[in-house]
Amino acid sequence: VPSVFVSLNTLEEKMNTLDKDKTQVVYCAGGYRSMIAASMLRAQGFLKVVDVVGGFQAIAPVTTVDKTTFVCPTSLL
């Protein structure tokens, strides 16, 4: 399943590139920005929105997906 990176500050302008008929899974490092993104998507008619509560920090310890230790500097704000 392909994924795309859309930062919260560009979500509004890139929203028209997302398919409203597909499930949109949103997450960030800690869960706050993804909560905002999910709210923005729902307000624009996206009905299939899944927000990963707690962000990547919450799922990293239990996932088997390969991951890096890199932390995006904007995640530290």
Image (cartoon, rainbow, N blue to C red):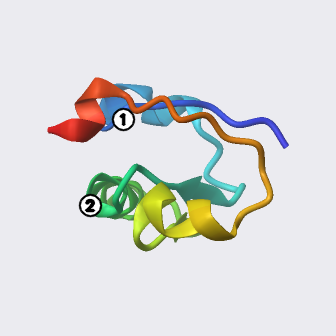
Q: CA distance from mark 2 to mark 1?
A: 15 Å
Residue occupying image coordinates x 61% and y 34%? 68
Within-10-Å neighbours for mark 1: few <14, some 14–19, many 20+: some
For numbered disc 1, what is the local secondary structure?
Answer: helix
User: How far across and how far down the image is residue 46, in percent?
Assistant: 51, 60
Question: What amino acid type should be assigned to the residue bearing mark 1?
Answer: Leu
Residue occupying image coordinates x 27% and y 58%? 36
- Whether residue 17 sits left or right of residue 13 in the image: it is right
For numbered disc 2, what is the local secondary structure?
Answer: helix
Q: Which residue is mark 2?
A: 32
The image quadrant that residue 32 belongs to is bottom left
Q: Please say whether residue 39 is visible from this viewpoint.
A: yes
Q: Which residue is mark 1?
A: 11
Farthest-out residue, right: 1
Residue occupying image coordinates x 79% and y 36%? 2
Question: What amino acid type should be assigned to the residue bearing mark 2?
Answer: Tyr
Within-10-Å neighbours for mark 2: few <14, some 14–19, many 20+: some
| Eye-nearest disc, 2 or 1 | 2
The image quadrant that residue 9 belongs to is top left
